[in-house]
Image (tube, rainbow, N blue to C red):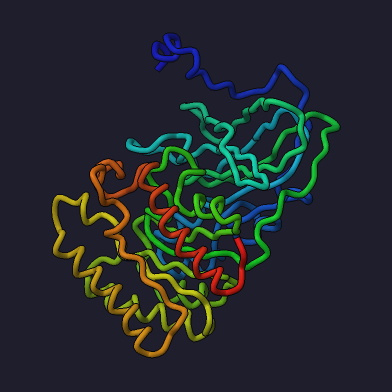
Amino acid sequence: MDNYINVDQNMIVNTTIDDVAVEWHDVRKSPISLHGLYEPESEPFFYRIPLDVAAATSGGVDRLNRECTGGRVRFSTDSPYIAVRATYRAVGRSSHLTLVSTSGFDLYIDGEYGSRYVKEFRMPYDMVDCYEQIIYLDSDTFRSYTINMPVHACVESMEIGLKPGARLDAARPYRDIKPVVIYGSSIVHGTAASRPGNIYPAVISRKLNVDVRNLGFSGNAKGEKVLVDWMATLPMSVFVCDYDYNAPTVEHLEQTHYAMYETIREKNPELPYIMISRPNYWTSIRNQEEILQRRDVVMYSYLAARKNGDKYVYFIDGMSFFGGENQYEYTLDGVHPNDAGFLRMGDCIGTVIRHVLEKAGESF
């Protein structure tokens, strides 16, 4: 590692900020806003669903709930630089994922014409439980920013650092509707994106300027009743059901998929409800017959709902995501989308969400 860094100095990651003065602001305090997390202003660390619901669902969901994927920090400032200082309860590392994705942050500028990526906050390879890093901007123009939180790490506290005396105000607001809620597997969770802003729920949030709650639980989204009952109580403008991949068997999917729809529909009679089948038919080298059987289960739920008169249910065929001449280039491992795959999913699912919101009266 040392030899590699000595060869390419661009790989050096500084863990302290010594060259400029920095004024630190707790992200839990106004006018900074937090999104995609469960009551983040008052809880002792950042997580996504109530701890008692997570524990009652399964041990896996209890652990993964503490990973703050989909969490966003939003604010506006005229500071010519933005720093991050974070402490961790757990740091995610994986042999096939980047550290920027598992445990880092990335920064976007939000404006009238959408959001654009600025730079990532990289964690040093040997970081254990805390670090700080700074991004220098091109000017001191007053602008709105979003910082995406790590995909596979448990962040305990976080501050943003600005030039002393810089203006700090609320972020450019999201569209004035309830959040889009997305429930699903490691694909929803964001596994295999190169950085947090590239996961498909984040792509949709930027594409449509909507708040999104990421309820992806890598390997552990199995449609458990206790979690479904809680999700049914959430304020939401659209619900996306994308857990096909984590159902242990076709039979399990049959037992839980339509039942989840019925539970959420009972409490949300006109909520747009989007069902998605798994995307890896074309990239899988085995189990293609089972993938088709699972697709049939999801399709059956959709058709049964339509037959019963539901005008607010939609189906997206996962087989449509990775077709074409480059169909084998959209995943890391034949299963998890890479950045190109996540972008395709975000564009496709985002287009459907836009359509259902337009039907509900939203203008874009």
At x 83% / y 38%, what residue is drawn? 167
At x 36% / y 71%, what residue is drawn? 315
Q: In the rendering, at what x and y percent does residue 297 appear?
A: 26, 74
Q: In the rendering, at what x and y percent does residue 152 appear?
A: 46, 46
Is residue 69 in sight in this rendering? no
Q: In the rendering, at what x and y percent does residue 94 appear?
A: 37, 38
In the rendered image, the quadrant that contains the C terminus is bottom right
The residue at the far front in this view is: 363
Q: In the rendering, at what x and y percent does residue 323 appear?
A: 26, 51
- Which one is in front, 219 or 128? 219
- Image-based side of 252 in relation to 158, left or right: left
- Image-based side of 170 in relation to 320, left or right: right
In the rendered image, the quadrant that contains the N terminus is top left
- Which one is in front, 78 or 351? 351
Q: Quadrant of residue 352?
A: bottom left
The residue at the far right in this view is: 165
